[in-house]
Image (spheres, coloured by chain):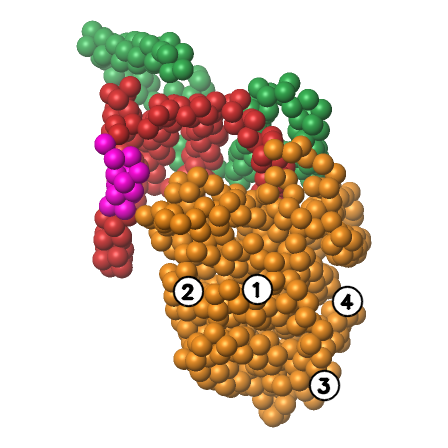
Chain colours: A red, B green, C orange
Amino acid sequence: MVILFYIAAIVAILAALGVVLQKTPVYSALLLIVVLCSLAVIYLLLGAEFIAFIQVIVYAGAIMVLFVLVIMLLNARRETPGQGSRMARWLGGPLLVVFLAEIVLAAWRQFPGAASPPPLNAGPAAIGQLLFRSYVLPFEVTSILILVAILGAVVLAKKS
Amino acid sequence: MLRDYLPILVQLIAVSTVGAAILAVSAWVGKRRPSREKLSPYECGSVPVGNARERFSISFYLVGMLFILFDVEAVFLYPWAVVYKSLKWFGFLEMFLYILVLLAGYLYIWKKGALDWTR
Amino acid sequence: MTPVQALDFIRVLPEIVLASCAILVMVAEPFVSARHTAALAWVSLIGIVAAGAGNAWMRRFSGPAFGGSIAADPFASYFVYLLLLAAALTLLGSVRYLETNQVHHGEFYALLLLGTTGACLMVAATELIMIFIGLEISSISTYILAGFRRADKRSNEACLKYFLLGSFATAFLLYGIAFIYGLTGTTNLVQLSEKLSAPGARPPLLWIALILAFVGLGFKVSTVPFHIWTPDVYQGAPAPVTAFLSVAPKAAAFAVILRVFLGGLASAGALVFWLLWISALLTMCLGNLAALWQTNIKRLLAYSAIAHAGYVLVGMAAAKAAGPEAGEGIASVLFYLAAYALMNVAAFILVAHLAGAGERYQEADDCTGLAYQRPGVAACLTLLLVSLSGFPATAGFFAKFYVFRAAIHAHLIGLTLVAVLNSVVAVYYYLRVVVAMYMREGNPRASASPLPWPLGAALALSLVGIFYLGLFPTPFVRLANLAASPLP
């Protein structure tokens, strides 16, 4: 299990680096699918079955379709390397280090010595019990959120 | 629990091995005699016209967007279907309400003609 | 876990009414011919009034609902009235605007109602996930509304900027929420405050969660340095939309800040206080100074809106500093937001009228000599600007007065001094527009057509409100105190 975790994690990190460093947008998008799938494996290893499958169905499946569509819509070609803002270089780098250090520190303090946290039981049934009992209102209100998005898509993107 | 997913892992490995093997073997064994016809992109038998990198119509985007929205809606049906029996009537009503709201959205899209390709 | 009862639904009655009305408007829209779209506006207005009535009726049934996701308390009720008022005024101000700008689509009203629904959910939510969903509903509706004039480049720019920066900020908030959940194991504000106030319970990385959440919410209320989007979006968005988004999402986000930072996370005292203190200082000063250089009225009002957020933050810092006597500071914030809502919505919908078709005339110079052509309109704008600058006998005066008094009672003398100096500076830029209207001769380019009656009604309503708050503030202060007292 630990081996699987490391494989998935390394693939995820390499693919994520690829997403950022690739110059051709379509390749970035395809690598993003790899990232999402390896994240799904990690979720599965944590015992979050439902999230793992949502990750594949919604993110790697549906949302990537939109990514690729937008790339085709904008007719995006190879990027030409820009100057890169100075702010990003001076502020972004240290911030990245600080955030990484924080996360590592937090993990260290929360689980000292433990190799891996105990797997959760987060299959569809457990999620269902939570979602349809304790979180009924957020669930119902999500329908309104989707409704707003539908209105937005039609208002902004429909040919008049 | 993870043991249940072992077949999937086996299948993943099998599929990628077979796929890689086919590519490798055909690259290794096959002969190459490139000609103009063979090098042209394959578009299901019809003659390719123009450049593939053209701007797409915004209609594709609209349909893609609506697809995602209803896909997200459908995702909530999985956990609901699993616990449906223990929720009894209450579960039925809450999903009914949820679907009803989105049905209104669907009606709106339909009447608005957002799904009509020709318009 | 108690099962859901009818009472739970009663406690979210205003939201249910608003959402149902929005759905009705949305579904009816394709069936209504273009000439009769105004009918949808009146349906929406009825919906808003009905939601207000629902809000009044459910006062007898206050309490938490849906397993603690949401609470119907005086605090929520106060904010729901405020949001409904902002929505109603915006609606009245936008009917004619949409006609003259040829974007008269029913979706506008549906989105306005849905945006209000989201904001109402935010102010009543006592659970971080619920807050997040409410915030998303209200944000996404306003992103879309900002781009409602699709043919206009500035509107497109506003929409895109608002959307990109807004979703980035939302991600910060979500990251903060995830941290809070990871550290404490709960997203419920009541449980959160119990867990954190227990002796010895100081999760190590809580400060990161606090800062992340504050950045996310700071964007929504446009505190410096997260204000950069504000002038461009306020200028580019259709003016009635600006009226709405400068008030409703902002007031709702302030309500969330109050609930989260002074309620759920109250025990994380010093850091929250300094966050509020510093952003109050920066927001006031930068908003007012930048406003001095503006010639475009919409941009000027945008910077003024930033400055007002700064004053509100002074009130919050005062509430935080006062410790157990936070009530006065919170009440001053509530009063301020009510006054701000009345003044700002009215100012922007009036500017929408003056700018004419296509919003061509937004400069202060376009109003040159307006007082001689349209004395009524000019007087109206003058009163609004005078109130925004905080002259006595207007709502703006007492709003500032109560905030400053709370700050002095909390011994924030330095901050109060800066705030007073700032409000003196602010008079200059507000009066510049007034000077252009009255003191200079010339033909105003701004639309000199008579006020359409819905806009007139909205302006009359807000002016009555402004003078009522400015002359007889006491009953309203009592109301604000009542709403401020039982903060979780």
Residue type, mark 1 in image: Ser
- Magenta-colored segment: predominant secondary structure: helix
Contact between labelled residues 3 and 1, with CB atoms less than 8 Å apart: no
Which residue lies under the disc numbered 1?
A: C246
Distance in Å between CA atoms under marks 4 and 1: 20 Å
Residue C397 inside the magenta-drawn segment:
no
Which residue lies under the disc numbered 4?
A: C454
Front residue (pair C316, C154) = C316
Mark 2 or mark 3: name the one nearer the start of the chain: 2
Front residue (pair C169, A154) = C169
Which residue lies under the disc numbered 3?
A: C375
Contact between labelled residues 3 and 4, with CB atoms less than 8 Å apart: no
Which residue lies under the disc numbered 2?
A: C273
- What subunit carries mark 4? C
Q: Residues in magenta? A: A101-113
- What subunit carries mark 3? C
Distance in Å between CA atoms under marks 2 and 1: 25 Å
Residue type, mark 4 in image: Pro
Residue type, mark 3 in image: Pro
Vertical relation: C67 (above or below) C251: above
Check disc 4 and report its element: helix, strand or loop: helix
